[in-house]
Image (tube, rainbow, N blue to C red):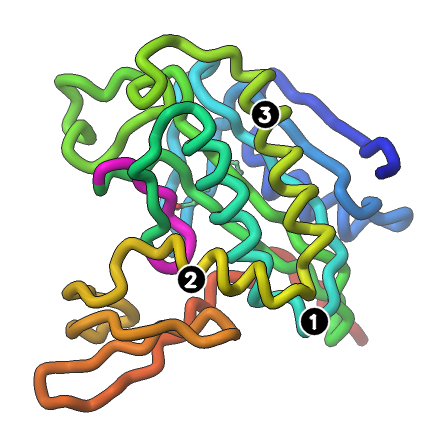
Amino acid sequence: MSPRLVRYFPVIDSTNQAALHWLAAADGAPDRALIIADEQTSGRGRSGRTWFALAGTSVLITLILHPSRAALPRITMLGALALLETVRAYGAADAGIKWANDVQIGGRKVCGVLPEAAWQGDQLLGVALGIGLNVNVDFAGSPLDSTATSLQAAAGRPLDRLEVLQHMLERLDHWLERIDDAALFETWRGALNMIGRPVSAGGISGTAEAVEADGALIVRTADGVRHRVIAGDIGVGYEEKRG
Ligand code: BTN
């Protein structure tokens, strides 16, 4: 596999934002280019939330991808799966994926994945796959203790973030090479930890029954009706209007 272009920033507003600008620049950004930051001042989370991580504690990256349009729904699966495998490799055998792309250890979130697409009119410029992994973070005593965890808690020791990043990139590359294989969807589906359980997703509360190949979640409500909830989390990160 060819070497990738890497841009490292000790401090940046958001690696996703930088990736979207890079994609929209005149000479664009090549596939698998990577932006890494030690700290973000405006880290972006899903649904307009902020992603906060203290300097020196986390792996904060954005991987730039040029998938086909058909493969767009699988970018979310790919990110979650690569992170799940990374987390398991560090001792979190009970880690799972909460639909669609939260990686959890013992029901607590260890990693966030935010894919954002850049468009110019109806032309897809690329995708910024943002990943924030809590590595050496101690949530004990903090308000987040019941909902968030870190890799060091699973490993039982502080970890070398560069080594974790290398492992993560190896798993991301593994699944990128298989983005059109049925194995990607099947493996992601097999790792979901909420099938058969009560969920609230997309404003629907019921039992998570299944997922479909495009990533949609099927939720059965108490009246027996099956609802199809779209992940919809390849948000539009950048859109350039023409004319
Ligand atoms: C979530 O809300 O679960 C997704 C969080 C994604 C955070 C990462 S940190 C690196 C990258 N740059 C950002 O601004 N956000 C993503």
Dot 3: what SS?
A: helix
Q: Position of residue 162 (x, y in %)?
A: 59, 16
Is there CB contact under 8 Å for labels 1 and 2?
no
Q: Position of residue 50 (x, y in %)?
A: 38, 40
Q: As displayed, is residue 167 above or below residue 235?
A: above
Circle 3 is placed at which residue position? 165
Placement of the C terminus among the 4 image quadrants: bottom right
Dot 1: what SS?
A: loop
Circle 2 is placed at which residue position? 189
- Kind of residue indicated by mark 2: Arg
Q: Is 110 or 24 nearer to us in this picture?
A: 110
- Kind of residue indicated by mark 1: Arg
Task: Look at discs 1 and 2 and give the one toward the viewer.
Answer: 2
The residue positioned 83% from the left and 45% from the top of the image is 30
Q: Is residue 233 left or right of residue 226?
A: right
Is there CB contact under 8 Å for labels 3 and 1?
no
Q: Is 44 or 139 nearer to us in this picture?
A: 139
- The residues tagged by marks 3 and 1 sit, at their Cα atoms, a distance apart of 27 Å
Q: Is mark 2 within 8 Å of ligand 1?
A: no
- The residues tagged by marks 2 and 3 sit, at their Cα atoms, a distance apart of 24 Å
Q: As displayed, is residue 144 above or below residue 187?
A: above
Placement of the N terminus among the 4 image quadrants: top right
The residue positioned 36% from the left and 18% from the top of the image is 155
Magenta part of the chain: 99-106
